[in-house]
Image: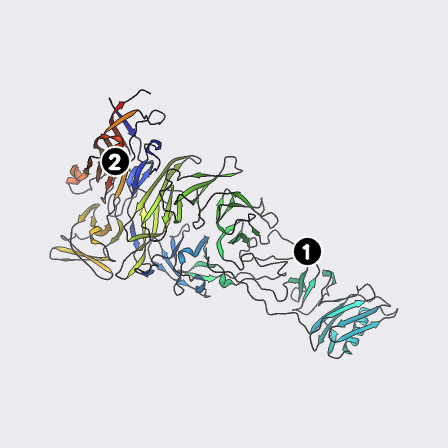
Amino acid sequence: MSLISRAIPGLFGGVSQQIPAMRHPTHCDFQENALSTLVDGLYKRPGTRSIANNLGVEWATGSGSSGNCVVHVIDRPGTNPHGVILTGDETTPLVITDMVTGASETVTFPEGGKSYLASSDPENSFRCVTVADSTFLVNTGVTVTALGGDGLTWPETVNFVYVKSAPASQLYAVVLTGFGTASMATGAAFSNITSLTASIIDQLNLISGVTAAQSYTTGLIEIHTTGPSVCYVADSFNNTTMVSLRTGVDKYTDLPTSHPEGYRVRVAGDIKNEPYLVEFKTADDRWVETRDYGISRGFNPATMPMKLVPVGGGWECRPIAYDERLVGTDKSNPQPSFVGKTIRDLFFYRNRLWFLAGDSCASSRAGTYYNFFAASTVNVLDTDPIDIGSAVASVHTLDHAVPFNEDMTIWASTKQQFTLKGGDTLTPSTARLVPSTSFETDGTVSPKTMGNKIVYPFRAKGSSQFGLYRAARDLVSNTVESITDHVPTYMPERVQAIEASDSFKAVLVKHIRGSSSLHVFKYEDDGEKMTQRAWQSFKFDSTMQPVKCHWSGSRLYMFMNRIGFTSTKDRLTLAYIELDPTIFDDQASHPILLDGRQYAMTASASGGNTTLTFDGRHDISKLVIFGSLGGYTTQYTVISSSLSSTQTSLSIKGLVPVGTIVSMGYRYTMAYRFTEVLLKDKDGVPIMSAKLKLLKILLNYKNTSTFKATVEIAKSGTYSYEFNSEGVGTIGQLLGTTTNLVSGAFSIPVQAPAQDAVITITSDSWRPVCFPYAEWKGNVNMSAKR
């Protein structure tokens, strides 16, 4: 038997569900409300601090809809971030909050459109994208409908004939269906367009119900009939001297040089092009391309995404003025593919606005974000809209678009990813939606960029798992690296959202509505290989349910549904967590580790005690009341309490000194359970012949107040060992000017076989707790030589 010791180099590995023999010493069995970092070690997570307790969004307690809303964050450089809350309520569909001050801001709907933002299930209905100063709001439950036509139809009682030439000695005929025929023969000397036109007009006026006259330009005959009629022309000169504008012309040069406005003429196409329509514009003094009679002008803007923009000191939300279809027919310039479907997502890419709908992806014209129709059907322009579908038969819905590796990656609801490619110039002729990879995904959750990678969820083994989508080293193919292979059943089967922070190097996983927990993936990498992959969980009081989280540097903003905040209502509130341990609280020289912290609304003295009033109803048994004056923080003793319908009143012992800032918050517990200690060789392989009796754990602590170590030994019992910094005297503490935080090593006795011992560290202190590393000592008995 020999006495040995081994270092646990850090408690930064997070949770592992592998068998103990496969774990790294830095892994643990369980970790809650503790954050693992390579620099600072393991420390108790900071608490949440209230910014606003009333954002103007409430639900009836027990209604089943509590927390059902969507929050989108507008975080523009140089301005405070703003939370856009979509409630689904048509009366008040939007609430906007300054996330620094907590103040609500004015939202107006100058052109209506509130009905588009109505939904009975907002959290599954809305998607939002912010580009520059504009935020686009998409209701994925609204089907895009087509607009009607312009009300114009072919003029059934008006026809035009254009005489282009007048060769001599020919036969001419103009036929008006339902009325008759004007025909004539010319002699050798009759070769004048003016004379021929006048003669044809004379013959037409001889037909009952027909009135004809020259119109606008030489050779143009305007014909009116008392009933519907279609005009046809013929001549003995191979039918080339006249054209009926009602039946169309063969080429653009067959058109008269002038014409009344509002009359559309079809020009025959060629092998490459469909026929197109033109009408004369007096202002331009030429024929311009136009749309066919009777076709839809485009799509209904009331069924399309809306735009939210800052205006003055408030916000305006209005339908977007999408451009109408001005040229072509349903065949030559069709409706975009999203008409008749619901839009799943939108994005900007290569100077175009794109919509995902069904299995297709449609863009606007380049540089003209609200025009989804071709400018001309005669020539295909590089700036024309792009409308492409997936080439995979099994794909029914394209769900998400994420920029990646200088391209746009499109994620389908099935296990399929596409890359939107188009070369150096993205045009209708070069754009392609190319199948790239086939990885299983959870289409209900939007993937997020994480540096040069994309993090996305998928479901397996009844749990949610996560992969990192990245370009392979050859830069030709894409590949996936799992970041949950060591925690395959750690998270619930369904999650609602993920948020990634490049600056703090963390990914946050938000559970579905009603959960009071978050999962956090803390990582470090060198651009290629990850040096830390630590999963842990944050657990809040059951009355605090995260609705939306947003990273802003090391600060994590959280919109939370506060259950039972008043006697009848659950309420949406706003708080934040400052995750940089070097940024201290403004009330103390260290972070205050309490959740839901808020200041007292009022304070009054009576009978040697102080009465404090706080917004909302709170569980007194979970609260800590403290005050700060001159950097020194004092915890107060509550001697009585009472609840009104909307407030909590507390009577604390003693009089609070003038100038003291008094706050309250919820106590929460940090817990960390060590992985089973194993003796391993230099290659990290467990020595199975070694029998290890664990004597003790030496836990290094730094700037720490209070914690408890619990040792549970199989068939023996459970033993607890507490550490309290108040028992370690310091000059600052004795003078009453500082909080007592100390550093050192704490010995945790075990005295049991390593496989029988479970060691857990907990702390419910509202002062800091930090553990950089640990060490174990034990006796080893080798039953056989290796």
Q: Residue beneath label 2, please?
A: 758
Residue count near mark 1 (Cα–Cα under 10 Å), binned few <14, some 14–19, many ≥20 = few
Q: Position of residue 138 (x, y in %)?
A: 46, 57
Q: Position of residue 722 (x, y in %)?
A: 19, 38
Residue count near mark 2 (Cα–Cα under 10 Å), binned few <14, some 14–19, many ≥20 = some
Q: Residue beneath label 1, please?
A: 273
**Can I make out residue 488 in this image?**
yes
Q: Mark 2: which amino acid?
A: Val
Assign a secondary structure to mark 2.
Answer: strand
170 vs 740, nearest the viewer: 170
Assign a secondary structure to mark 1.
Answer: loop
Q: Position of residue 234 (x, y in %)?
A: 79, 67
The quadrant of the picture occupied by the C terminus is: top left
First in sequence: mark 1 vs mark 2: 1
Q: Is residue 192 left or right of residue 631?
A: right
> Is 288 rendered above or below residue 748?
below
The quadrant of the picture occupied by the N terminus is: top left
Name which residue lies at 29% across and 50% down.
Answer: 49
> Is 208 rendered above or below residue 294?
below
569 vs 674, nearest the viewer: 674
Q: Mark 1: which amino acid?
A: Asn
Residue extending farthest to the bottom is: 208
Residue extending farthest to the top is: 785
Name which residue lies at 35% across and 45% down.
Answer: 519
